[in-house]
Image (cartoon, rainbow, N blue to C red):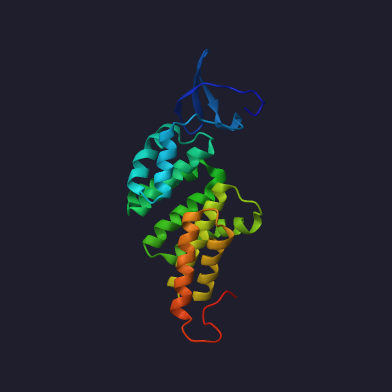
Amino acid sequence: MKDSKIIKGVVTSVDADGFFLKDDKGTFKHPHNRVARVTLDLPAAFDQAMKAFAEGKYSEAAKGLKPFVDKYAGVGDDRVATALISLADACVEQGDVAGARPLYEKFRKLYASQQDRAEVGMAKIAVLERKYDEALKLLEPSIALAAKTQSPTPAQERGFCEAFYLRGVCLEEQKKYSEALESYLTAAVIYSGYSQMAAKAKQQADRLRQEHNKSPGTPTVYVP
């Protein structure tokens, strides 16, 4: 707690204002704004679901993550926030925009301090719908935050990597090839800690250069 007390128990339910914790004295509600940090004792099934997500097994990941999101969404354990955004991302990867949109909205509401991650998620939907100007607008907060963050957390690195990758996609669709290349390379090199997306960004950068720099001499697509 913010008053330095440590409370242990079983989380029985969560709402927008706090969560209920059962201990040997009973079940009590603890408001989110009085809690400094939460560490849940998550079972191996959680790690298995996240592993499935990392391997691109999105249906399996969504099935595994949903019980944790349903039970714990809103609790201040960073792994729960990551589970919620990953569940939404898994829906997008499967083309389920209707399922993803309310999950991003839920993340935006429950984890307001990480709202930029929800905006990146909404940008993914905009890209699927070929609304590239809208997607670029949604990505602006993450791009701006990345410029000010020297040592990003793993969650931030994932968000920044995705933001620059998506920015590259949008700029390429708008035929702004050099700017697109710069965004892909930023995702691939600067935020390489999110290895799956970084590898995808590198592939896009290599493809873009190969397609547009066919003649010798000064390349037509380059990083300014």
Residue 168: where, in percent of width, then height? 49, 67
Residue 24, placed above or below residue 116: above
Number of on-image labels: 0
Q: Is residue 219 left or right of residue 95?
A: right
User: From where the camera sits, is residue 139 visible?
Assistant: yes
Residue 179: where, in percent of width, then height? 53, 72
Residue visible at 51% across and 21% down?
9
**Quadrant of the snapshot with the C terminus:** bottom right
Q: Is residue 147 left or right of residue 87?
A: right
User: From where the camera sits, is residue 166 visible?
Assistant: no
Residue 120: where, in percent of width, then height? 48, 55
Residue 100: where, in percent of width, then height? 38, 49
Residue 23, placed above or below residue 194: above
Residue 208, placed above or below residue 150: below
Residue visible at 57% across and 59% down?
143
Residue 126, placed above or below residue 36: below
**Quadrant of the snapshot with the N terminus:** top right
Q: Residue 72 is drawn in which quadrant?
A: top left
Q: Residue 62 is drawn in which quadrant?
A: top left
Frontmost residue, 179 versus 193: 193
Residue visible at 50% across and 55% down?
195
- Direction top: furthest residue: 25
